[in-house]
Amino acid sequence: MSKSSQRADCRNVIQYRTFDRRYVGSMPRLKANFGADWVAHLRSFLVNPEGWSAAEVALLDDRDVRFRYFDAQRRRIFLVPRAIRTADDFVCPPEHEAGWQMLQEEVRNGLDINPRLSKRHSSLLNPDGLLAEWGVHHFHLGVSPDLRDPDYVGRTGALLYAMVRDKDFYAINVYSHGDFEDSNILESIHRNWPEAIQRYRAKAATGGSWARSQRRSLRRNNANVLSVTADGTVYMPIGGPVMASGVKAEAVWLADYWQIKVDEIQANFEEQLQEVLPALRQQGYAGEDELDAKLILLSDTAAQVLFPKYEVLVNVALTVPVAQGRHAQS
């Protein structure tokens, strides 16, 4: 294990690697709860910089904060340039052509297109069935700020339905607010971009052809159903399965993965506390039985632990593969 000590931001900083299992002598007790620190970071991050309602986030219990943080990642569209791909039967009504042209420029230049989403997306708890089942967003095609809420683009009856991925914007077609359950949406994605949803094909399974009212009811109950296209291809929900709570199953998996990882970091840190004692002694530690510590950063590749009394900051490099999925840079 390599160590180095240097001054940075008025703190003694130690470089530290996880999963080196050496244990050296007796140690003081680490008084810490990295799990609680992590949840507090997620709660804070949801409000700022992500901009979710502070009042709504405050009402979430600690367990739900973890799930909602990862679930929220699908609700907001990150600002990166994307290539636009249009379906073979895409048609924009002439009266909305100007709005469509503006949206295309925003997409290509990586500008913020979230103001074109439904105002209901201001809530973490918004049950968007179209997004949940098919991974499809719907965009308003206004050309000026909304008169009632200028943080949004002007509302339009016509909506651009699109599947948004990291590098691509798949423009399906222009629909209305009453078309969220239209099976032609799935048909279009299957016909135009089958490779984008191939992972959700269900082999040796029978899917249903659901009427709009049936699909609406199923979505309201957070049911996961198999759907069959005109050529007989069967798909699981191409937006990914949901739990009974409406949270994406992937969000629950990621939350559980990172909870285990945080617990491992604390357990490993307690085992190797002897490694940081020299730096703590330089900052005034005189052999107390307990040492207060806080997890102040957790990213995909590193963590930082602070001993606030002594202003000692420990950088922890995560040396094991991490789960896919954006994590808060707490």
Image (tube, grey):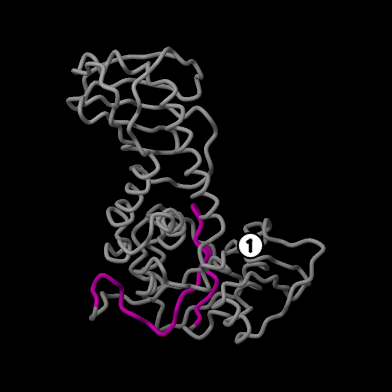
The magenta segment: 149-175
Q: Position of residue 290 (x, y in %)?
A: 29, 26
Label 1 sits on a secondary structure element that is loop
> How many numbered tags mark residues here?
1
Q: Position of residue 118 (x, y in %)?
A: 38, 74
Name the residue rendered at 68%, 81% in the picture.
Answer: 210
Name the residue rendered at 27%, 62% in the picture.
Answer: 54
- For residue 145, what is the image quadrant? bottom left
Q: Residues within 10 Å of mark 1 (few under 14, many from 20)?
A: some
Q: Is residue 298 above or below residue 62?
A: above
Magenta includes 89?
no
> Which image quarter is the N terminus in?
top left
Name the residue rendered at 30%, 61% in the picture.
Answer: 58
**290 or 148: nearer the eye?**
290
Q: Is residue 303 above or below residue 138?
A: above
Locate residue 201 relative to residue 2 in the image: left or right: right
Q: Position of residue 3 (x, y in %)?
A: 36, 14
Name, please, the residue furthest toward the right: 204
Q: Is residue 40 above or below residue 309?
A: below
Name the residue rendered at 53%, 30% in the picture.
Answer: 320
- For residue 202, what is the image quadrant? bottom right
Magenta includes 168?
yes
Q: Return the residue at label 1.
A: 193
> Which image quarter is the C terminus in?
top left
Locate residue 93 relative to residue 295 in the image: left or right: right
**177 or 313: nearer the eye?**
313
Locate residue 41 relative to residue 21 in the image: left or right: left
Locate residue 22 relative to residue 87 in the image: left or right: left
